[in-house]
Image: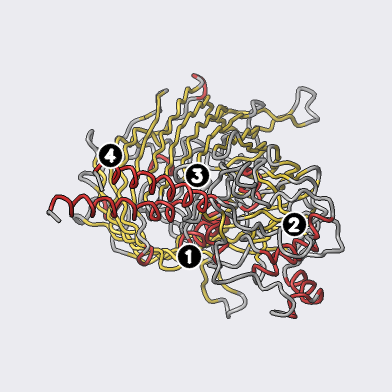
Amino acid sequence: MSARRFWALYIAALAYVAPLAAAQAQSPVAPPNAAQEPSPIASEGAPAQATVESAEQQPAPVVTPLVAAEPLQLDAAANPAATSDEMVMTELAKLGLDAAADGGVVDTSLKFSGFADFALTGVFGREGDWRGAYERFSAFSIGNFNLYTDKRLLESLRMFGEIRFTFLPNGTAPPGAAPGDYQQTGAEDYANFKRPVSWAGIYIPRVYLEWTPYRFFGVRGGVILTPYGIWNVDHGSPTIIPVQRPFVVGQALFPERQTGIELLGQFDIGHHSTIGYHLTLTNGLGAVNEYRDYDDNKAIGGRLYWSFDGLGQLRVGASAFYGQDTTAHEMASFAPDGQHVVFTQKIDQQSDVLALAGDVQWKYRGLHLQTELITQQRRYKDAARPGSSNPFFGRYLAPSDRLNWGIYGLVGYRFDWFGIMPYFLAQFMDAFDPAAGALYFVNSFFAGINIRPIDVLVIKIEYNQSHFPRGFIIAGDTQLGQVQVAWAF
Amino acid sequence: MTFRKLSVLAWMLGSLALVPLEAVRATEPQDALLMVAGTSFSGDDISFASVKSAFRGQRIRIDGQSVIPINHPLNSPGRVSFDRITLGLEPTEVGRFWIDMRIRDQGRPPTIASTPELALRIVEALKGAITYAVPSPALARLRIKILTVEGKSAGQPGYPLTR
């Protein structure tokens, strides 16, 4: 055989075999609806969308069953019980569904859930510095015990409430008081031979009525968590990666919660992209903003975000808030007629507050990246600038108009093994705290391990260190070690 | 036969052997799930966004009808693939995802049927209910309709419920 003939035969063989193989590869499998017996789907006139197009029309990849090893057990011979309507009715009842109702039934049961956490916190360093200001000795504590109540009233109407049970105010200093000026809440317990008991309080982070007629439009009314950034709404200790939220979130440059109305919704702009929004109209800031507005200037706010799930989960958001922060009291006096009492408002402090923030979060497989930049501009009314005599400096101090801001970045990686996530968080904040009368110019890092051995339980072991480049009223860096166990229920 | 001829022969036989290998690669299955609804379900198509939203615990209405997503049990093969496609979650992440969603008050997980077969039976009986299924001739015995997703049938290029 000559070389030329040999190559010709070889190419011919390739030309013969390859198309056969390709054709075999592209021939469709029998579609599920194209069983030997007539399909009831087709017979009812519904389009048989499940059929794979013929090879001529659609030279598409082959569709094969995912679970050839576990075929559906719908054959009466194979599973006689599966054909029983009674079995389906039992399942529906078990799931709280009702085939007789048009579209099922509304689950109006009252649902309770929540989260809690237990921690051991200790301050490293010399006696008398941060140990005295924060906690002199390491201590165990229950930080959060938050109970959720959730009830659907109608199909599109529901209520949601969150109550935090707390040991506060026992053992704490009132805001603005000197550290160490602890208050006690002891009382005689009449149900226990008047033995002393420390009463505690509750805090209501949110309670609202929600009407959601459409996915793109919903309304909430009540006490709401301000929809900004990532870790204000996402505030539960099992979901927060570090033991505590970053300083700039805890500092509440945006109000943590507000009382008023929130519009919210989301809509899709493609297979993988969603745009969401929140708009708020509230009492705004103020010492008693839960039920009182000391000025007639309602606060407005909003959040716009874009989420993309084409490559992990990416979310980019921007938030804004504008409102007036007023603290005032009413002064009673006699009217000129001398027969009636009139009230005059005395404003103690008043300022305009504009807060802006941006956030990015990307989760891809085990990787978790997250950052938030939060700013607040506060401008006091000249006649209503608060001030007080500082007990340490012995002189009158008043805050200036300023830009408060902070930023943090977190990186973590969750391993499948025991759900372990090592994480590192770096942060910076430049903010004046009116309650403490202190300026925080601080950079800090948290390094720790977040372990989630089961879905409802998180164990966190963390070290954090904060440095004050411009000095602080308390000398030295803070070094804190914390262990926390948080769980959802 | 010289070494050179032997080499050429080996190369040719090897290249011929690659043909069936390529064919095998072409026949590698692309996992696809079917979206299934009862015959009373409004319409024959559903958007991928609606599927994702419904199974992420958000309220979805199609032609005024509430969509009731029915999920399969955790770790059932169809569920594993479905969670990967629609939520981008591996089985170990699903529980955490729903715990976190509940804490944020951003939605509760869809109703979970005891078995994939019962999920189909529920869809058959309950107006507005949707679920998913692996392609199987057994589906033809049910009074259900298989929805196109984004106007595409399973097997067509761009069909979203494919891995």
CA gap between label 3 and label 1 equals 22 Å
Chain where mark 4 sits: A
Q: Are marks 3 and 1 on the same chain?
A: yes
Disc 3 residue crowd, few under 14, some 14–19, many 20+, Cα 10 Å: many
Q: Percent from the top left, x then y, of residue B56?
A: 61, 52
Chain where mark 2 sits: B
Q: Percent from the top left, x then y, of residue A378?
A: 46, 26
Of the pair A204 and B45, the residue shown nearer to us: B45
- In this view of the protein, can residue A157 be seen by the observer? no
Disc 4: which residue: A443
In the image, taking residue B88 as reference, residue A163 lies left or right, namely: right
Disc 3: which residue: A232
Which callout, 4 or 1, points to the residue nearer the camera?
1
Of the pair A415 and A251, the residue shown nearer to us: A415
Q: Percent from the top left, x then y, of residue A57?
A: 63, 41
Quadrant of the rendered image containing residue A475? top left
Determine which of the numbered discs, if any, sits on residue B129 in the image: 2
Instruction: Report the colour scheme.
Output: secondary structure
Q: Is residue A127 above or below residue A301?
A: below
Disc 1: which residue: A455
- In this view of the protein, can residue A51 be seen by the observer? yes
Q: Secondary structure at mark 1?
A: loop
Amino acid found under the numbered disc labelled 4:
Asn
Which callout, 3 or 1, points to the residue nearer the camera?
1
Mark 3 vs mark 1: which is more N-terminal?
3
Amino acid found under the numbered disc labelled 1:
Asp
**Quadrant occupied by the C terminus of chain A:** bottom right
Q: Are marks 2 and 1 in contact (CB under 8 Å)?
A: no
Q: Are marks 3 and 2 on the same chain?
A: no
CA gap between label 4 and label 1 equals 33 Å
